[in-house]
Image (cartoon, rainbow, N blue to C red):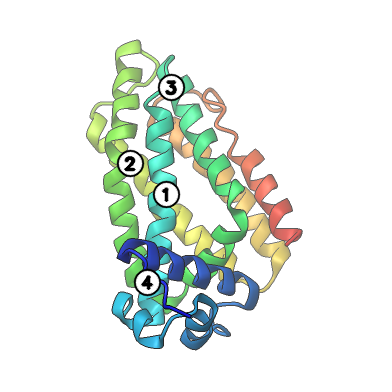
Amino acid sequence: MARTVKAPEERRDELLDTALGLFLQRGYDRTSVDQITTTVGVAKGTFYHYFDSKEVLLEQLVQRFGEQLLEQVEAHMSTVTGSADQRFREFVRFSSELKLGRAHEALELGRLLYTDENTLLRYRLNEDWIERVHPLIAEIIEQGCHEGAFKVNDVAATTDIILSLWFDFSGRVAGEYFQDPDRRRRVDRLRRSNLALEAAVERVLGVQDGALGLGFDRYVERFLEMEAGR
């Protein structure tokens, strides 16, 4: 049988998709490069043409996952009109729904990402994602200031603070969640942390507690239901 020749980007995506499927079925540690290439039907050398190692493939999987979510968020938010608080809520709602829609994938990648050996990778990815989201959030906050809904002194700095809360604090909570073997304790921590996070965001924006109605707790409960039903 003649070997199928595919465009480089198509072949790379095929390897990534196959690896992800195997990770979800078998787990990352129990999936070998041989299993990935055998499933795709290519030589082992083809794998190493695209990825220096399985660890590099994991990095690209996480990058692609985040990129896909960000592209969808950007496209959706470019069509959203209304007041700043409405748009802020829609950003949270749409972003959360996207992640919940891919919860199985997010859980597996999260468990792999939040390990000590991937600390540098997490930091690098967070910096990239913060840079990408910053202008979108800053534009909403600036609108809110013009409307009198948000009371901040510096739009750019306030955006930095909010994104630090979302990425840094949320990352710390996620790390504890994935590493704590006591499910009751980690679930309680997740619930309390997200309520505190929502209150902190509202206070940074200068609005009353509960005024934005971001509903972080609702998304947490749905996530926990999905995680328990895996």
* Point 28% across, 54% down: residue: 128
Which label sits in the foreground, 2 or 1? 1
Specify few, some or many for label 4: CA neighbours under 10 Å numbering under 14, 14-19, or 20 or more.
few
- Residue 215 position, x and y percent, is 60, 34
As drawn, 73 above or below 18: above
Residue 136, percent across and down? 32, 33
Q: Which of marks 2 and 3 is in front?
A: 3
Tell me the number on the disc at residue 68. 1
**Image location (x, y in percent) of residue 135:** 27, 35
Element class at badge 1: helix
Q: Which residue is drawn at 63% across and 78% down?
A: 26
Q: Residue furthest right?
A: 229
Alpha carbon distance from label 4 to label 1: 22 Å
Check disc 2 and give the amino acid type.
Answer: Val
Mark 3 nearby-residue class (10 Å; few <14, some 14–19, many ≥20):
few
Q: Which residue is labeled 2 in the image? A: 133
